[in-house]
Image (cartoon, rainbow, N blue to C red):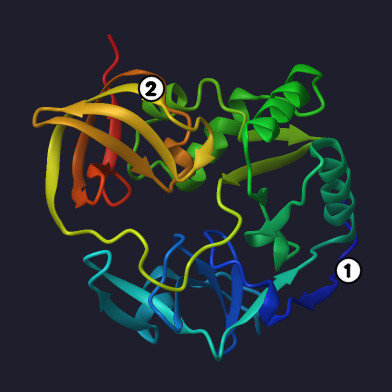
Amino acid sequence: MFNNVFNKYSLGKNNMRFLEGESYLYRGLIYIVKGYQHPENFLIAYPKYSAISGSKLEAFNALKDTNIIYWDCLKLTVPVIPLDSAHPYTLRGLNNIHYYKSVLEALLDTELYLTGSASYSSQFRDVDFVIYEANDKIVAKLRELFQRKILEKSIWLLIKEHRDKHSSSLNLTDYLYLKKNTILHGYYRGIHVNLKLIELSKGYNTCIEPVYGYSHYTGYVTVKKAENPHLLPTRYNAYIEKGEVVLESLRELYAELRPGLYYTVNSRLEERKNGFYLVPDHGILIPVKE
């Protein structure tokens, strides 16, 4: 279906965003940035692909040679790469992918950042795009594309997404409940497209939102209202047994929660300057359906 033609290019240092989803080349591996704040002179990033062989790294081998540090800002142990040796890196991908990318950019009036397996290999199941500095206007345009059937919803697409990425942590029924009204997954001209909408335009190479302390929480969570629906980091007004919290996530999985009751296992309850934040990203969040 696609021509096996790649057009590689690297962005200069002045194009560093320090944001979730960006690709960086370091010692022959492609790393994917996690989060929006990073230790000075480093980027929090996970090794995902070999730039030499064009293959995805196995989970065990990925981290064995990666520099792991404890960062007190987040009260977490994180993998990092040095800024002075890492280079912003991406692949335009196959010619047809680049064409579809340009059409969607015109329809949404914004830049799409190609990431995931389609950016480095001709063997891929889906195409992943990140939109930086996303806002309510982008959300409205995405809804319109689905309404006009330019992007098409499919239950089979979601079943495949669950099988490939979430079957080890969520059953299919719970996943379909979470994604019932999604605008982040769809078909475009037969291509399975995934979108991640990042609210920020730039991340930080310093600590801007320190965690003063944390504990682990397992129990019920009542989600009341989304502060920024579909955007990441996503935030919800929520309540747990101990009182009011902000439920915050950088995972696309939790970017479209409906108001209601959920049960979380091993979430982090973090104390920050503005109060308590419940972060389910290292645990699991399950809908409690009536």
Three-letter residue code for mark 2: Lys
Front residue (pair 244, 252): 244
Asked whether, in this view, residue 75 is left or right of residue 153, the answer is left
Q: Which mark is residue 5?
A: 1
Q: Nearer the viewer, residue 120 or 280?
A: 280
Q: Which residue is mark 2?
A: 225
- The answer to whether residue 92 is left or right of residue 239 is right
Q: Which residue is located at x 65 percent, y 25 percent?
A: 154
- Local secondary structure at mark 1: loop
Percent across and percent down for residue 84 are 55, 90
Residue at the image position 79 percent from the left and 37 percent from the top: 108
Q: Quadrant of the C terminus?
A: top left
Tell me: residue 197, above or below residue 261: below
Name the residue at the front extreme. 273
Q: Residue at x 51, y 46 (%)?
A: 164
Image location of residue 222, percent across then percent down = 24, 22
Q: What residue type is disc 1 on? A: Val
Local crowd at mark 2 within 10 Å, few (<14), some, or many (≥20)?
some
Separation of marks 2 and 1 at Cα, in angstroms: 45 Å
Query: Where 25 falls versus 48 (above or below)?
Result: below
Q: Is residue 205 visible?
A: yes
How packed mark 1 is, by other alpha carbons closer than 10 Å (few <14, some 14-19, many 20 or more), is few
Up-down relation of residue 122 to residue 199 (above or below): below
The answer to whether residue 244 is above or below residue 202 is above
Based on the displayed image, in which of its 4 quarters is residue 72 positioned?
bottom left
**Residue 289 marker:** none
Dividing the picture into quarters, in which one does residue 5 lie?
bottom right
Residue 158 location (% of width, % of height): 56, 31
Where in the figure is residue 26, as x and y percent of width and height?
56, 85
Q: Earlier in the sequence, mark 2 or mark 1?
A: 1
